[in-house]
Amino acid sequence: MSRLAAAAILALAGGTVRAEEVRQVLPGGQAPAQPAQLTREKAPDESEIQRFCSNIADAARDRRYALQAEELKQLQAGIDERMKALEAKRAEYEEWLKRREVFLARAEDSVVKIYAGMKPDAAAERLAMVNAELAAAILMKLDSRKAGVILNEMDQKAAATLTGIMASAARRVDPS
């Protein structure tokens, strides 16, 4: 029985086998050289570990702060970039709103002039078909005499609705 087989049987039986006891030698080969003894350094004691940790604590803290500061700078740059984009959009929307208001003012003035030039019965008939709020706005911009004649030509129910809208729009305090 070879030494390897003997060592395996001994290990299975519960015995201990050291590495230098188990060697396999091939037939016709040289005996293997003895392995170099590994030397184990003395484990550092608690005071050395504490000194090491306390020595690097300030550097580690400074590094953490530097990383956090860099991350904050990147976040601030992203926020600044978004703020610029939002400001540009806001300016664009304000410009669009101004153009829209100018257009609506012109359109309202031209619509009011159209209704002012119409015969009262025809104007009353047309205003009865449009949105009540729009009709009330047109009547409010018309000369009061012309608006009165148009309301006189309208159906009673439609005239009452328009008069209610015009009266609530003329209030200075919000009714709600």
Image (cartoon, rainbow, N blue to C red):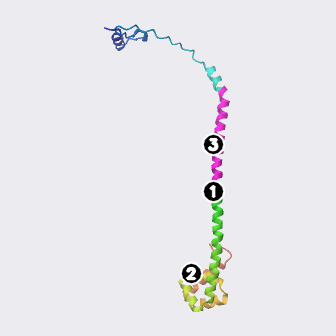
Query: Which residue is denoted by mark 1 in the rendering?
Result: 85
Residue 63 coordinates in the image, percent (x, y):
65, 34
User: Residue 109 in the image: x percent, y percent?
Assistant: 65, 81
Of the 4 image quadrants, the one containing the C terminus is bottom right
Crowd rating for badge 1 (residues with CA inside 10 Å; few <14, some 14–19, many 20+): few
Q: Which residue is mark 2?
A: 132
Amino acid tagged 1: Ala
Residue 1 at what x, y percent from top left?
A: 31, 8
> Of helix, strand and loop, which one carries label 1?
helix
Element type where label 2 sits in the image: helix
Q: Nearer the viewer, residue 166 or 78?
A: 78
CB contact under 8 Å: marks 2 and 1: no
Above or below: residue 168 compared with residue 86: below
Which residue carries the number 3 mark?
Answer: 71
Look at 67% across and 74% down and name the residue there.
Answer: 173
Which tag is nearer the camera, tag 2 or tag 1? 1
Residue type pointed to by label 2: Ala
Q: CA distance from mark 2 to mark 1?
A: 40 Å
Q: What are the residue bounds of the magenta stretch?
A: 55-81
Q: Are marks 3 and 1 in contact (CB under 8 Å)?
A: no
**Gap in angstroms between the C-alphas marked 3 and 2:** 58 Å
Q: Amino acid at mark 3?
A: Glu
Among numbered discs 3 and 1, the one appearing first in the sequence: 3
